[in-house]
Image (tube, rainbow, N blue to C red):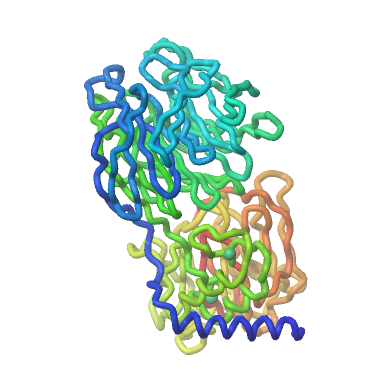
Amino acid sequence: MSNKMKAKITFVLVVLVTAIVLSSAESARAATWTQKADMPTPRWGHSAAVVNGKIYVIGGLTSETGFLNGKPISVVEEYDPATDTWTRKADMPQPRGYLYGSHPVVDGKIYITGGGKSASSRVDAYDPATDTWNRVADMPTPRILMARIAFDGKVYTFGGKTGTLGSSAPTVDVTEIYDPKTDTWTEAAPMPTRVWEHSAIEVNDKIYVIGGATGQNSIQILQVYDPQTDTWTNATPKPLNTRGFSATKVCGKIYTFGGWLNSGQRPYADTWVYDPITDTWTQAAPLPDYRATLSTSTVNGKIYAIGGTPRQHNLQATTTVYELDLDFPPPDLNGDGFVDSADVVTMVDHWQTDEPSCDIAPAPCGDGIVDVQDLVLLSEYLLKEVDDPTLVAHWALDEAEGNIALDSVSDNGDSDGYVIGEPIWQPNGGLVDGAIQLDGVDDYIIAAPVLNPADGPFSVLAWIKGSAAGQTVISEPSGANWLSTDPFEGSLMTELTNAGRSGVPLLSETTITDGQWHRISFVWDGSNRTLYVDGIAVAEDVQDGLESSSNGLYIGTGKAMEPGSFWSGLIDDVRIYNRPLIP
Ligand SMILES: [Ca+2]
Ligand SMILES: [Ca+2]
Ligand SMILES: [Ca+2]
Ligand SMILES: [Ca+2]
């Protein structure tokens, strides 16, 4: 170890000791929805914007029977999440409904584009600092039900409907951009697929235009606009096609809530999360109630879902405010179930880098640099029980008898393993408490599927002690060998690879069948796959996706249970996380 590194670690330990003494943080909590103070004015089809940590809910429609009968309103209400209080602000100059989603904010001013019952081209700017309204240049194309987003000091608007609201109102493909500096509009490349009741969110300089409807029907589509090149591409659409949903972003991921399949259908409560880095969708805690045409806003990493309608007919306007407190994992960076000195060393190894799993502060999204702030936050978790929402399965293998290997994560027993072939439990012979000893002939454990490798970044880890090459630690029945050894040297390898003919196994040159305990792991971070042995990366390559599979898992035999693929030796503490680790 260099003197520089020693100095770093010494410094780190001083910070840690100080932080532990001062710390009074609670342990991690689970993702939960909480109902907050009702909005004074019930509404649906409104829109919201965040300025200086406060949410401004603007316009929308009141309860009426029938979609076309909603009455637009001009009411503006400010919600302060810090105090859970509402304040009435200056009305819009004219009532407007059919807005949906978020209003763009540029330089602290909120821009309300179009809307109305007949499509309007009017644009008003609201300044929360002075509680005043100011009309600006009209949009070229009068519209309702468009998507809009602020980016790089401009307001981007996409698609929507023009004319008078109704089934015959034409859907338009226009991309129109407003520049507040010059008070002018310009046109950009139109949307490849014209949609309405969609949403737009910007992440890393790309604008994701999600879902919506063509004609009367919602479609599965994710159109991506690049403002730098004025070009469109398609990405993986949300698995559930919806319109009238709402979207917001937290820590570079897009969260979408509710919406409906089509008019006349009951709204969904579903929450779908898109990760632009991996181009994958996952589900998260659903809304507490069915909602369409709601607004969602993010303040300090928490999401506020406001108003909207729970019904398909007789569109009842609501006043509800639900807060989603997201579930961020504890800084157990190496995935051993503890936050301790090993994690401190990992953080120090990534000091002054932008390693995402170490960049935890300021919570919840980090700031692109691993520094003292991150270490102080890590120290708040030291010596506390870790409740990790990203741990999706954990077979401790601490049993003393029987044919069930308990999964400590699932509370309904769904992922408990069935132990076959009469292997020998070793309650005192494991690396972490007990382990299981397999005979290399017909012993293995089978478990239900816990994670689809195609769904997003994940890590799989195990302690092993074995002595024969060609054997497998973890595999998927009729799928891939997740962690196995090559038949010649007993080096760690994986068959987890992308779909199609370009997929090849990843082989290390590190022998793990030397009869010693080794911590072996596979990590896919969304763009690279890496094999680790005892904390050292032993093989890595670029891999932008992994093949979809959900057949379950074998522990201790190969995907086809070939003779020779059965593990002869000990296996302990098998863990699967749905995030990338640094094992
Ligand atoms: Ca740890
Ligand atoms: Ca940081
Ligand atoms: Ca046996
Ligand atoms: Ca164990």
Residue at image location 74% in from the left, 58% down from the top: 541
Q: Compared with residue 277, is residue 144 higher up or lower down, i.e. above or below?
A: above
Residue 288 falls left or right of residue 100: left
Q: Compared with residue 99, is residue 364 higher up or lower down, i.e. above or below?
A: below
In the image, 432 versus 21, the foreground residue is: 21
Q: In which quarter of the view is residue 491 placed?
A: bottom right
Q: Position of residue 539 (x, y in %)?
A: 73, 65
Q: How many dots with numbers?
A: 0
| Residue 255 in view in this figure | yes
In the image, 230 versus 198, the foreground residue is: 230
In the image, 320 versus 454, the foreground residue is: 320
Instruction: Tell me the quarter of the image containing the N terminus.
Output: bottom right
In the image, 229 versus 142, the foreground residue is: 142
| Residue 195 in view in this figure | no
Looking at the image, which residue sits at the far front?
130
Q: Position of residue 531 (x, y in %)?
A: 68, 66
Q: Position of residue 458 (x, y in %)?
A: 56, 59
Q: In which quarter of the view is residue 266 placed?
A: top left
